[in-house]
Image: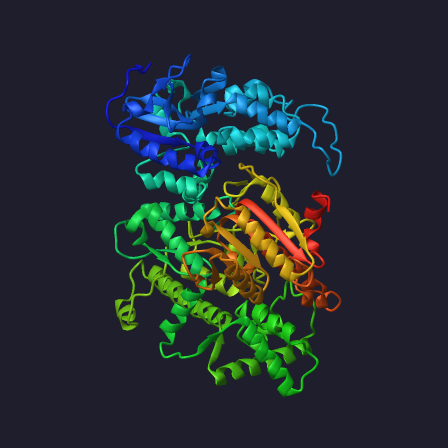
């Protein structure tokens, strides 16, 4: 047992997971006092102003003055090592001292702290009937976890002081209330069990990755070692605590790696592997740690044999910053971080350095298709259909001859076409390509398709040379290799892909050719529920076989369960693929966080809705403006929101293709611009029929049913992505007829 003697000058101060969530709910003045307290306490904890006292009946729990009204509760780990577990009003510190439970978990070896009084009060509050429920709840015949014994729950690592309460839970609201205050591991175990996972599965997937290797050697009095196994952050400077509190845990969850995820990061794969999961489940974090793991296993050198890529420039820049934070400049020096279109451009320019063509967007290309059909007097074909056929089939599958086009599968295109029609389409596609050539124009998809062909040709040469080398007993032809101007080799040893669902078939063909097939060659993370571009691919057909090497993350560390439940309502009744011919699902997708329900607001006009947006912003006075965002369907609406905010004295900044225009103010942008971003509070305005989805989508319902379903699915995904950018608060508004996608949310709210 540690001596209760007052510590000497200087201390290590740690912050226990979930203590920050309690602190952030306090008034701003009190939070400021906590900042000052931690600064002064680290310098000299025995200063008289802290009135440091050991709590009656506790050998390790102490309290220290934060200000005249509040005190900090700290566990003394040993010597000058302290763990901040709570901040309470001084009138509550000495109440129910016997209900403050803490200890070292005998399964995980981590420190756990629970205020049983708070947990029980919250669970009881949730158990009370609502004043006017939308629908009467069905009575529960038995507790949620009646099939498990106290011993089984303890074996899974559930915090033992909470087990009696767990065994009494009767509904999901009570469970979520307990999970909000319980240690994170306890919450994860219970949510998995509730979602139907077996005892054996939860033990293998959740408990074993965090269990101590030799429980018989666990020292129940070694609190400093236990702190190293705990969800705790050492406060090294004033900014550390400030970033954790003010960012609302954003900074921590962006680099935090759960042991379950760590298992995926360190696994040796015999070929391509995939990790899927809903928003906030840590897919990108897994990808970043995977990159570091691969770099750590490289032999010394100065090359960049690891590629980290994603689908746009902003996300690539974010990946670079986060990898630098995670692994430092040494890791960054061995990784090529570039978005996939930039990579394709690099390959093409390497082959054709004199290329001066101007790049154009798909919308501009569609306009060129329309103009071509008008000039040709062609009315048999629709410009949108031809544009999609060109993008998805001809360019998407890197088809570069009429013969190949006759043979290629058109999976997912819906409308079937005859051989004669294929001949007509190919002729029009050739004329379209010539048209762009004469104008000095090209699309990103054209560049990706050309890059794929160039890399496939390069791979063919590499493999042929290796075969010749093998045929000669491992000796290559030095004259042939030196005569080529360079020793041909694959560009990368490992490739890691983030946001994999938004890459096209041509992108995948290019990447497949850039790395030799073999162990740990390609590692991809993504979620097809967040696909916002019309790229339908089947990885197996592109030489990327992930069968048997797929894993799914189900716990969100970013967004509250209330927001997730509403966002998943947007996807209700719709099936999504898994990039390999099967269905993907969000079954079992849960959050370990709890908060306010999203709010729905109806207006009579867009002008009135803009006023509602301003009113909503003014209710979030305690949130930094840069942590708040407004999302709308169109660029015109972005301009109108910014104008209205400016007239009301609210600073804002537009999110463009290159990111926010300014570092200050509320972020405003279209749904496409919010991919990969996250905010504490979010407003989605203009969620009305005709805008979400846009009215033109229904034109396909009777002419191309498959395309109609795909376009509706994409519109749902955009709204889903926007809704899941919020962590603490979400407000959705519309004027006129609400979007059909909001029907489940409105029904749940009784509207």
Query: In which quarter of the view is residue 350 placed?
Result: bottom left
From this view, report whether residue 448 is shown above or below residue 662: below
- Please tell me how many numbered marks the rendered image carries: 0
| 177 vs 346, nearest the viewer | 177
| 168 vs 422, nearest the viewer | 168
Can the viewer see residue 132 in this picture? Answer: yes
Can the viewer see residue 685 in this picture? Answer: no
- Furthest residue to the top? 57
Q: Give the percent coordinates (x, y) of residue 175.
A: 60, 30
| 127 vs 496, nearest the viewer | 127
- The scheme the figure's colours follow is rainbow
- For the point 48% across and 15% down, the residue is 98
From this view, report whether residue 643 is shown above or below residue 369: above
Q: Give the percent coordinates (x, y) of residue 221.
A: 36, 17
Q: Give the percent coordinates (x, y) of residue 186.
A: 52, 28
**105 sits left or right of 505 in the view:** left
Q: Give the percent coordinates (x, y) of residue 541.
A: 55, 59
Quarter of the image that includes the N terminus: top left
- For the point 26% across and 56% down, the residue is 302
From this view, report whether residue 95 is shown above or below residue 375: above
- For the point 49% across and 50% down, the residue is 678
């Amino acid at each position: 047992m540690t001596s209760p003697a007052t510590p000497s000058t200087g201390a290590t101060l740690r912050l226990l997971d979930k203590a920050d969530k309690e602190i952030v709910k306090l008034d701003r003045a009190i939070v400021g006092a906590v900042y000052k307290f931690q600064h002064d306490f680290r310098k000299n904890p025995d200063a008289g102003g802290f009135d440091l006292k050991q709590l009656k009946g506790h050998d390790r729990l102490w309290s220290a003055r934060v200000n005249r009204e509040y005190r900090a509760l700290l566990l003394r780990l040993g010597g000058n090592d302290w763990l901040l577990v709570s901040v309470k009003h001084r009138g509550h510190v000495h109440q129910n001292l016997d209900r403050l439970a803490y200890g070292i978990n005998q399964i995980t070896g981590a420190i756990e702290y629970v205020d049983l009084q708070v947990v029980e009060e919250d669970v009881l509050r949730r158990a009370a009937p609502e004043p006017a429920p939308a629908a009467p709840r069905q009575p529960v015949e038995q507790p949620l976890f009646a099939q498990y014994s106290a011993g089984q729950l303890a074996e899974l690592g559930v915090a033992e002081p909470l087990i009696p309460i767990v065994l009494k839970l009767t509904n999901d609201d009570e469970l979520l209330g307990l999970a909000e205050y319980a240690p994170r591991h306890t919450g994860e175990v219970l949510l998995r069990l509730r979602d139907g996972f077996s005892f054996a599965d939860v033990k293998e997937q959740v408990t074993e990755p965090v269990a101590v290797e030799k429980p018989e050697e666990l020292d129940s009095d070694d609190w400093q070692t236990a702190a190293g196994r705990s969800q705790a952050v050492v406060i090294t400077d004033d900014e550390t605590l400030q970033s954790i509190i003010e960012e609302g845990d954003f900074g921590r969850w962006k680099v935090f790696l759960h042991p379950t995820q760590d298992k995926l990061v360190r696994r040796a794969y015999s070929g391509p592997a995939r990790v899927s999961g809903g928003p906030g489940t840590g897919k990108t974090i897994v990808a970043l740690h995977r990159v570091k793991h691969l770099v750590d296993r490289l032999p010394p050198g100065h090359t960049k044999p690891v590629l980290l890529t994603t689908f746009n420039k902003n996300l690539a820049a974010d990946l670079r910053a986060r990898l630098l934070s995670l692994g430092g400049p040494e890791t960054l020096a061995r990784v090529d971080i570039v978005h996939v279109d930039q990579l394709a451009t690099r390959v093409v320019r390497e082959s054709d350095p004199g290329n001066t063509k101007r790049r154009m967007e798909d919308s501009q290309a569609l306009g060129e298709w329309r103009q071509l059909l008008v000039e040709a007097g062609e009315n048999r074909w629709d410009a949108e259909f031809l544009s999609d056929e060109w993008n998805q089939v001809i360019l998407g599958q890197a088809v570069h001859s009429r013969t190949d086009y006759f043979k290629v599968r058109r999976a997912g295109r819906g409308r079937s076409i005859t051989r004669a029609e294929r001949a007509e389409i190919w002729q029009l596609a050739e004329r379209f390509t010539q048209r762009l050539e004469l104008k000095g124009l090209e699309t990103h998809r054209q560049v990706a398709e050309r890059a794929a062909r160039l890399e496939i040709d390069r791979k063919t040469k590499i493999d042929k040379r290796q075969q010749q080398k093998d045929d000669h007993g491992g000796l290559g032809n030095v004259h042939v290799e030196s005569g080529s101007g360079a020793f041909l080799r694959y560009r990368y040893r490992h490739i890691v892909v983030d946001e994999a669902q938004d890459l096209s078939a041509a992108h995948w063909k290019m990447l497949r050719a850039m790395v030799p097939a073999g162990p740990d060659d390609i590692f991809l993370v993504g979620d097809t529920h967040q696909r916002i571009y019309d790229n339908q691919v089947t990885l197996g057909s592109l030489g990327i076989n992930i069968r048997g090497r797929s894993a799914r993350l189900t716990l969100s560390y970013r967004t509250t369960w209330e927001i997730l439940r509403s966002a998943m309502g947007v996807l209700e009744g719709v099936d999504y693929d898994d990039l390999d011919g099967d269905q993907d699902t969000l079954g079992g997708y849960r959050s370990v966080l709890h908060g306010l329900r999203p709010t729905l607001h109806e207006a009579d006009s867009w002008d009135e809705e803009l006023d509602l947006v301003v009113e909503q912003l003014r209710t979030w006075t305690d949130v930094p403006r840069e942590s708040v965002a407004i999302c709308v369907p169109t660029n015109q609406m972005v301009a109108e929101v910014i104008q209205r905010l400016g007239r009301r004295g609210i600073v804002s900044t537009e999110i463009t293709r290159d990111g926010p225009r300014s570092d200050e103010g509320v972020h405003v942008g279209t749904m496409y611009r919010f991919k990969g971003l996250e905010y504490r509070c979010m407003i989605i305005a203009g969620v009305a029929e005709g805008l979400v989805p846009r009215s033109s989508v229904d034109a396909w319902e009777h002419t191309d049913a498959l395309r109609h379903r795909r376009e509706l699915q994409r519109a749902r995904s955009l709204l889903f992505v926007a809704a899941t950018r919020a962590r603490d608060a979400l407000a959705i508004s519309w004027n006129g007829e609400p979007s059909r996608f909001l029907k489940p949310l409105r029904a749940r709210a009784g509207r």
